[in-house]
């Protein structure tokens, strides 16, 4: 892993810990998720009530069982004959997590992550679909990693140079937010919904 990737991974880990800690401070406990026996995750931390479990982001490297089958994008790159930007690969293989709400100078957003290995496979399929759409529209390839509070607006990484942009689904990016994913994550503030129980 390059120093840039290590920095991004550490920035993500720090941010995810900060999110969980802020949630505990503001709400009194970790975030909760509706429990589904068919959709388990190492993020789950025990029962909150009859139908919800506490959860927190978990470092993929810390999971002994998952390391038997390392999460990679090799199959995506092979299928498309296309190399993904290293920041996107690092971003989606650093933590398992539910969506993490955050705020930046441009407004509110939700960072997207895989919940478990099955969700990672589904994420790969969505990324393939997104890339094929971009290629069909003859647009620069971007890879989404967050959604905004505005309908059909996503935040993505330019696959060529790693810059972070806002784009409407199906359209070219229209507003640059940051020179890199690491810098973008560093400027975010976790947003905790204090209405949850």
Image (tube, rainbow, N blue to C red):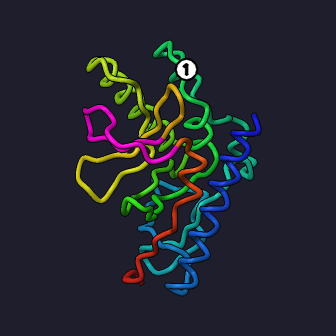
Q: Is residue 196 left or right of residue 136?
A: right
State the image coordinates of residue 167 (x, y, percent, origin top left).
32, 41
Span highlighted in magenta in the image: 164-178
Quadrant location of residue 20?
bottom right
Question: Which residue is at the front of the view, 15 or 95?
Answer: 15
Quadrant for the C terminus, please.
bottom left
State the image coordinates of residue 130 (x, y, percent, origin top left).
35, 30
**Residue drawn 31% across the image and 39% down it:** 174
Quadrant location of residue 172?
top left
Q: Mark 1 falls on what kind of element?
A: loop
Q: Main secondary structure of the magenta part?
A: strand
Q: Is residue 65 left or right of residue 144?
A: right
In the rendered image, the residue lying farthest to the top is: 81
State the image coordinates of residue 111 (x, y, percent, origin top left).
46, 54
Q: Is residue 181 above or below residue 50?
A: above
- Magenta stretch: residue 169 in it? yes
Neighbour tally class for label 1: few under 14, some 14-19, many 20 plus, Cα within 10 Å: few
Quadrant for the N terminus, please.
top right
Please name the residue that numbered disc 1 is placed on.
83
Q: Is residue 52 above or below residue 4?
A: below
- Magenta stretch: residue 28 in it? no
Q: Is residue 65 left or right of residue 192?
A: right
Q: Is residue 48 above or below residue 126?
A: below
Q: Is residue 105 left or right of residue 57?
A: left
**Residue drawn 61% across the image and 76% down it:** 21
State the image coordinates of residue 141 (x, y, percent, origin top left).
40, 25
Question: Which residue is at the front of the view, 66 or 5?
Answer: 5
């Amino acid at each position: 892993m390059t120093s840039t990737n290590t920095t991004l991974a550490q920035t993500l880990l720090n941010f995810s810990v900060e999110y969980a800690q802020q949630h505990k401070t503001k709400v009194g406990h970790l975030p909760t998720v509706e429990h589904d026996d068919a959709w388990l995750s190492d993020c789950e931390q025990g029962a909150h009530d009859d139908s919800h479990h506490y959860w927190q982001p978990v470092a993929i490297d810390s999971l002994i069982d998952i390391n038997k089958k390392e999460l990679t994008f090799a199959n995506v790159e092979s299928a498309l004959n296309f190399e993904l930007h290293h920041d996107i690969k690092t971003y989606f293989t650093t933590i398992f997590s539910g969506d993490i709400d955050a705020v930046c100078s441009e407004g509110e957003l939700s960072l997207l992550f895989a919940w478990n290995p099955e969700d990672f496979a589904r994420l790969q399929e969505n990324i393939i679909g997104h890339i094929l759409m971009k290629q069909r529209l003859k647009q620069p390839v971007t890879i989404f990693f967050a959604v905004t509070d505005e309908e059909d607006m996503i935040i993505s990484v330019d696959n060529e140079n790693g810059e972070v942009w806002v784009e409407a689904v199906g359209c070219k990016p229209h507003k640059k937010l940051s020179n890199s994913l690491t810098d973008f994550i560093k400027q975010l503030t976790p947003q905790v919904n204090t209405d949850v129980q």
